[in-house]
Image (spheres, grey):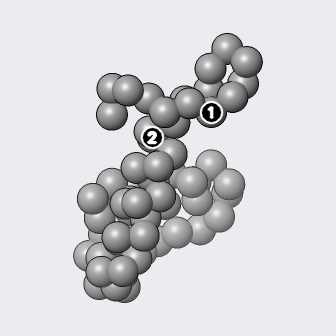
Amino acid sequence: MCTYLWCCVVSAAKREGKPFDMSLMDFADSLAPEDMTEWSNAISVDAATVDDADGEKKVCRYL
C-alpha cells in the first residue's frame, strides 16, 4: 500500500509540475501508521462508489 501511495504522489506531482524527489524508502519512513490507515480508508470509500447515469453516487456491488 505504501508503494502504491508513493506512486500516486509521484504521478500527481509530475502532472502538476511540482518537484518530488523523495525516494520510496524516505517516503515510507516519513509516514505514520495512522497516515496509511487514513489513506487506505479514504480510497476504499472512493473506490466503493460510482457515478450512475444521473450523476448520483451509488455503492459499487463488486468491491
Q: On screen, 44 above or below 13?
A: above
Q: Specify the quadrant of the image occupied by residue 2.
A: bottom left
User: Which residue is the site of mark 1?
Assistant: 57
Whole-number angstrom distance, CA of label 1 to CA of label 2: 11 Å
Residue 4 at what x, y percent from top left? 33, 54
Q: Is residue 16 left or right of residue 24?
A: right
Q: Is residue 23 visible?
A: no
Report helix, strand or loop for mark 2. helix
Q: Mark 1 against mark 2, which lies toward the viewer?
A: 1
Residue located farthest toward the right when viewing the structure as drawn: 54
Using the image, tell me which numbered label, if any, was put on residue 47.
2
- The residue most toward the top is 53
> Could you tell me the amino acid type at mark 1?
Lys
* Residue drawn at point x = 34 percent, y = 70 percent: 37
Q: Residue at x 40, y 49 (%)?
A: 44
Q: Residue at x 49, y 33 (%)?
A: 59
Q: Residue type at mark 2?
A: Ala
Horizontal side, residue 55 vs residue 30: left or right: right
Answer few, some or many: residues within 10 Å of disc 2's Cα (few below 14, many 20 plus, some between 14 and 19).
few
Relative image position of residue 17 (x, y in whole percent)? 67, 57
Name the quadrant containing residue 33. bottom left
Q: Position of residue 48 (x, y in %)?
A: 44, 39
Between 29 and 57, the residue placed more toward the observer is 57
Answer above or below: position of 50 versus 4. above
Above or below, 63 relative to 29: above
